[in-house]
Amino acid sequence: MKHKPSHWLFLTNDWLLYTNLVFLFSLFAFWLFERTAFEIAETLLAPWFVICRALTPPSWIVERGNMLLGMMWIFSGCFACSMLISTCLVTCRRYLARRRLEQPAFSAREKKK
């Protein structure tokens, strides 16, 4: 008897794929549009920076211009946002697939009446 893979496995694979694609796209955008991307990231990732500032030991923040720490915060924030975006994409894709499957059955019932 063959074991049928679970639909959760497919959802997890889709989620990981979308997460990687969104994260790579955001890194490419940072590289391509450096100044604009950092301005946008500063605005969008402001809540993430508050969390990072609260979790970072004070000894690590020697001065305000700690470049490595700032880059670490930005990359981790981009990854966290890409995980949230990919969760939304997988959820919408699953909902639209169900809707598309239900649509022909609904129109066929309407034609019979």
Image (spheres, rainbow, N blue to C red):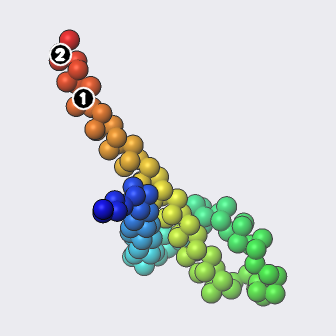
Neighbours of disc 1 within 10 Å: few (<14), some (14-19), many (20+): few
Residue 58: x and y in percent read 82, 82
What residue occupies the far front of the structure in this picture? 1
Residue under the image location 67 percent in, 61 percent down = 47
Residue drawn at the location 72% of the way across and 66% of the way down: 50
Q: Residue at x 17, y 15 (%)?
A: 112
Which residue position is annotated with label 1? 105
**Does residue 39 show up?**
no
Pick the front one: 40 or 94:
94
Q: Give the image quarter of residue 102.
A: top left
Which residue position is annotated with label 2? 112
Looking at the rendered structure, the number of numbered marks drawn on it comes to: 2
Image quadrant where residue 108 sits: top left
Instruction: Tell me whether the residue at label 1 lies in contact with that at label 2, contact meaning CB atoms closer than 8 angstroms.
Output: no
88 lies left or right of 70: left
Q: Is residue 62 above or below residue 95?
A: below
Question: Picture coordinates of residue 107 (x, y %)?
Answer: 22, 24
- Give the mark, 1 or 2, whose residue is nearer the N terminus: 1
Amino acid type assigned to the residue bearing label 1 in the image = Ala
Residue 111: image x %, image y %?
Answer: 17, 18
If the image is split into quadrants, where does the N terminus sit?
Answer: bottom left
Residue 72 image-quadrant placement: bottom right
- Depth check: give the residue in front, 86 or 46: 86
